[in-house]
Image (cartoon, rainbow, N blue to C red):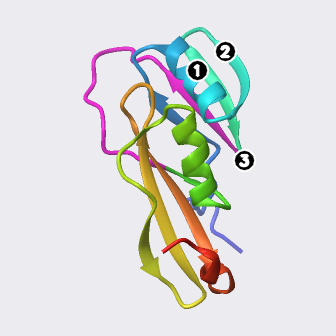
Amino acid sequence: MSHPDAAPSVSLEKIGQIAITVDDLARARDFYQNTLGMKFLFDAGNLAFFKCGDIRLMLSTPEKPTPRGGTILYFHVPDIHATFSTLKQRGVNFIDEPHLIARMPDHDLWMVFIHDSESNTIGIMCEIPRTDLEFLPR
């Protein structure tokens, strides 16, 4: 039995929403919806919301000037090479090409990085099971 004055246990484990600051909300909404193919949910003033799995992604213009950078969203995809090819055809600004990050016991971790329409960095990651590795381009 806990003491009535004891602080409740707190454990932050599940992310509900992530916010990204953008300069041009319409341009960013178009990029995330039409270029990246995210499901648009709704607008609310200077905010645009997207469904991103179980997490809601919010794009917003800054309330006051603040420095940018430092935070990178990583999106998991089933096929990094197909995603790279499709997004390249859509005119996405890639920072690099898909590359191996780490060899794990049961999979290899691959990543590629892009800039969104507002120069925010986005990571695209893929965990390729060892059984599928023989089919990758070398």
Pointer 2 with pointer 1, Cβ within 8 A: yes
Q: Amino acid at mark 3?
A: Gly
For the magenta stretch, what is the residue range? 53-73
Q: Residues within 10 Å of mark 2 (few under 14, many from 20)?
A: some
**Residue in front for this viewpoint, 23 or 81:** 81
Q: How many marks?
A: 3
Q: Amino acid at mark 1?
A: Arg
For image coordinates 44% across by 17% down, the residue present is 61
Q: CA distance from mark 3 to mark 2?
A: 18 Å
Q: Who comes first in sequence, dot 3 or dot 2?
A: 2
Disc 2 marks a residue whose amino acid type is: Asp
Position of 44 compared to 137: left or right? right
Marks 1 and 3, the one that precedes in the sequence: 1
Name the mark nearer the viewer: 1 or 3: 1
Query: Mark 2 or 1 closer to N-term?
Result: 1
- To which residue does mark 1 refer? 29
